[in-house]
Image: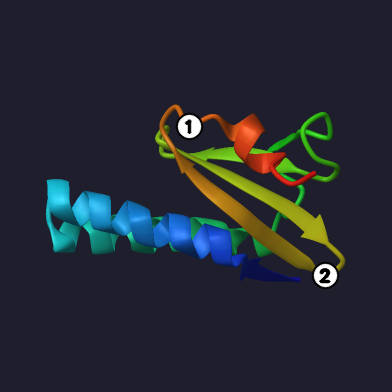
Amino acid sequence: MRVRFEPSALADYDELFEWIADHASVATARRYGERLRRYCESFVLFPHRGLLRDDIRPGLRLIAFERRITIAFAVVGDEVVILRLFYGGRDLESILTEGD
């Protein structure tokens, strides 16, 4: 089992890093980003955690990180694919179903 980040999740990560760096500090953004990355990488141990949301997208799972981030991911074969990282009250359903 391995963890892979989709380009959209990497873009979300970069956006989050920039926001924290602008509103707090680069050091704070690095610490938060490292905690988030380690948490995502821990999915290799228990990949089927989180809430299964087949009603939004087949195989989609959602889980919270530190009450601020929602991680959208799916288990595909021997990979945990991080699809998106959502901060706060973003409309997950409309974003995750775009193009379907």
Circle 1 or circle 2, nearest the eye: 1
Q: How is the image coloured?
A: rainbow
Separation of marks 1 and 2 at Cα, in angstroms: 29 Å
**Type of the residue with mark 1:** Arg
The residue that appears at 83% across and 45% down in the rendered structure is: 59
Residue 97 horizontal side relative to residue 66, left or right = right
Residue 100 occupies quadrant: top right
Label 1 Cα crowd, 10 Å radius (few <14 / some 14-19 / many 20+) = few
Kindly identify the residue that appears in the image at 82 percent across and 29 percent down.
55
Q: Please state the horizontal and vertical placement of residue 86, each as a whole percent of the image.
A: 49, 42
Label 1 with label 2: CB-CB less than 8 Å? no
Residue at left 25%, top 50%? 19
On the image, the x and y values in percent for residue 54 come to: 83, 35
Q: Residue at x 16, y 63 (%)?
A: 27
Residue 78 got which mark? 2
Q: Is residue 64 above or below residue 13?
A: above
Q: Amino acid at mark 2?
A: Asp
Q: Position of residue 15 (x, y in %)?
A: 35, 55
Label for residue 90?
A: 1
Which element type, helix, strand or loop, lies under badge 1? loop
Residue 52: assigned label: none
Q: Position of residue 98 (x, y in %)?
A: 69, 42
Counting every numbered tag in the picture gives 2
In front here: 35 or 73? 73
Residue 74 sits above or below residue 5 on the image = above
First in residue order: circle 1 vs circle 2:
2
Q: Quadrant of the N terminus?
A: bottom right
